[in-house]
Image: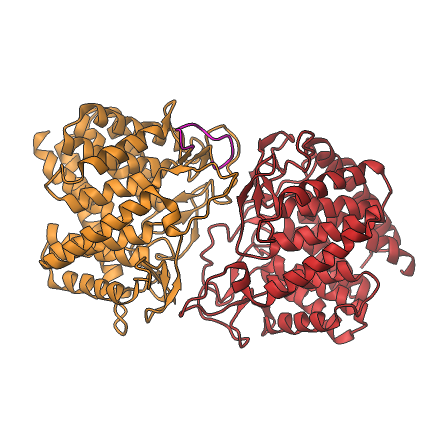
Chain colours: A orange, B red
Amino acid sequence: MTYDKNYFLSLKKQFEQELFESVLPFWEKHSPDKKNGGYFNCLDRDGSVYDSTKHVWLQGRQVWMFSKLYREVQQRPEWLDLAASGMKFLRQHAITPQGRVHFTLTADGKALYTQRKIFSECFYTLALNEYAIASGQTDLQQEALQEFEKIWEFSQDASLVGRPSTPGDPGFKTLAIPMIMLNLMEELSGDNHSKFQTEVDTCLAQIKKHVIDQTVYENISPDGGIVNTSAGRLLNPGHAIEAGWFLQHWAIRLKDDQLSELATNIVRWSFDKGWDKKYGGIIHFLDGGGYNPVQLEWDMKLWWPHCEALYAHLLNYFTHRDDADLQRFKQTYDYTFKHFPDKEHGEWFGYLNRSGEVTHRFKGGPYKGCFHVPRTLWLCHKLISEKVDDL
Amino acid sequence: MTYDKNYFLSLKKQFEQELFESVLPFWEKHSPDKKNGGYFNCLDRDGSVYDSTKHVWLQGRQVWMFSKLYREVQQRPEWLDLAASGMKFLRQHAITPQGRVHFTLTADGKALYTQRKIFSECFYTLALNEYAIASGQTDLQQEALQEFEKIWEFSQDASLVGRPSTPGDPGFKTLAIPMIMLNLMEELSGDNHSKFQTEVDTCLAQIKKHVIDQTVYENISPDGGIVNTSAGRLLNPGHAIEAGWFLQHWAIRLKDDQLSELATNIVRWSFDKGWDKKYGGIIHFLDGGGYNPVQLEWDMKLWWPHCEALYAHLLNYFTHRDDADLQRFKQTYDYTFKHFPDKEHGEWFGYLNRSGEVTHRFKGGPYKGCFHVPRTLWLCHKLISEKVDDL
């Protein structure tokens, strides 16, 4: 392979340009709600607001992103101000009377909907912790730890967030839970890698159960088997790839070679299975039994699996120096940068059909905000910066 | 136009063939669960079962369909037996301890999930009523009426089925509720057109509020206005077209010319707006404000809006004899019969991408069962049979 130091340096520069000249300006310019605080996250192609509903996952993620950039990239006061606006809005409006976290709010912060899931709590806590460190407010960091303890209980018993249980329910264990918990614990533990040792071990053991015959199942039975239904056979390659790099981070922290090997393989297996041989790009959903997934959007190409794959392959390469991972990175890079960035208005499109045409013109929606694109650009840039001199 | 009696006679014959030689045999052969009763409704292209989960909407609808065919088309004992098997399964397993109706069951009838919506109740009651008449069990018809009274209460107060209300909730009134109630009341009242007069008037008044500036909005505010969010601007052309023919049936029953005019226009406006000028076919979702719908599947072509449009246009034509409706019928017919029927294994595909390629190979899934295709073939056939001699 001919990839040398210069290749990575030019890549680093491109990621920097994309982040600073296209992606961040879009959110800085269009998302702030100057009246109520927080962010508009439903933004049309040109940044205009088409729905003022505020999705709490995306509010929390944007607080996290700007706090992180302030702390790790550059201490721009306007970034901390932007994070502060979202944090204040969330602390004022996102908490339910029962101490849970809402899923959606109106522009002025009235409660709209609360999910029977833990993810609003997770992204709220990610925001709280990172903003606390960035702004130097240790009381908020303490608050984040208290939130975490609550989420941990929820994560082990779904009935605590109101999920009903029924006699026929297979009691699925879902990959999303140990994944997000590992990510949250990485963030909350900082340099103290053994801070959540028991909880981390629990999550690692849980995730390993989802890997059966070189395939990562999204939902498994409580005893770790495959349930022979569409939901039980569901594969979500982008999600598994994201789980892969979460695991790789823990493998590096824990200096666990076996875990690192598994993390690498999870990314490789999921990517190779999810890559569309006909049109390119990562397919959103597959059925592990070879049936047709029932999700209507199964064959679409979404921006976030490609973001996850960019960083996961690069991390694998710099961890193991296997050219096959660099080849996978290049394949993902070519598809991603050809299809997703909007050169006219900035940021990236989020949704393509199977053959790669943009199907949704908006830049922000109920599930797409200021998160996956800047996170991957920042992570890739950071990784190359740290590793390029070792080449 | 050159459409004469012979055109309709050949159409009638084609619908009959499609129903008797392709669609019904598929369900008769592949859906019966001989062990537990009821029907497998997740059937792959060739009819093999890929998921044994039983979706109660589809179980109820299949009971209804075979009972209706037994009563209106031909008294084949095997059709009544098939309906009886589903009815028995539902009566044994579908009712919750609180007297509601589950959404999904395992193959052997264990409860899986209960929605906070009224539609399981509606399709259960449609089944109960039609099966009662077909089998001559008047006690079951009485039971259907009692179910209806409960559903009516639910339909006027969503909190009764556990829908939470929040301070920011716009309190959407959704088209689906008065629509399905009108359909249910048509079925339950038989020839006694004034049986539910107050309830019918209420639903007609509710539906009329959804029509604003020649556009049928799926969700409106309690005072009948447009809510300026993606959900508030949502258009579902196929659903509006279905509402149109439900209304036309009531207009005919009530001899209400003004209502008939509105019903016709609802179909015309929704079809003209929903028709994809680029690729043909009816688009699944639109945004009334011209924005991009947020639903990932917005630009797909689903089988059921095309089924609804086939019958709605034909009904409009035979009601008003305006060639423009026959033209719309022909346009729908050409697209539908070119794209949806599976000539190899029978029945129809359910899901196409925007350009008309089949994206989901299965014939039955969580929302597609033995219902829309046979219902429209039967309704169109029946209508032509009744009206063709008037031409």
Image quarter where the N terminus of chain A lies is top left
Instruction: Look at the image and say whether residue A230 sits in the magenta stretch.
Output: yes
Instruction: Report the front residue among A234 and B278.
Output: A234
* Looking at the image, residue B159 lies above or below residue A133: below
Question: Viewed as shown, does residue A163 lie left or right of B210?
Answer: left
Residue A302 place in picture, x, y as percent: 38, 45
**To which quarter of the image does residue A325 belong?**
top left
The residue located at (36%, 51%) in the rendering is A349
Image quarter where the C terminus of chain A lies is top left
Which SS does the magenta portion mostly show? loop
Residue A274 place in picture, x, y as percent: 40, 33
Residue A296 place in picture, x, y as percent: 51, 45
Instruction: Look at the image and say whether residue A318 sits in the magenta stretch.
Output: no
* Looking at the image, residue B256 lies above or below residue A363: below
Range of the magenta residues? Answer: A221-231
The residue located at (28%, 72%) in the rendering is A36
Furthest-front residue in this view: B97
Residue A105 place in picture, x, y as percent: 36, 65
**To which quarter of the image does residue B275 belong?**
bottom right
* Count of all numbered marks drawn on residues in the image: 0
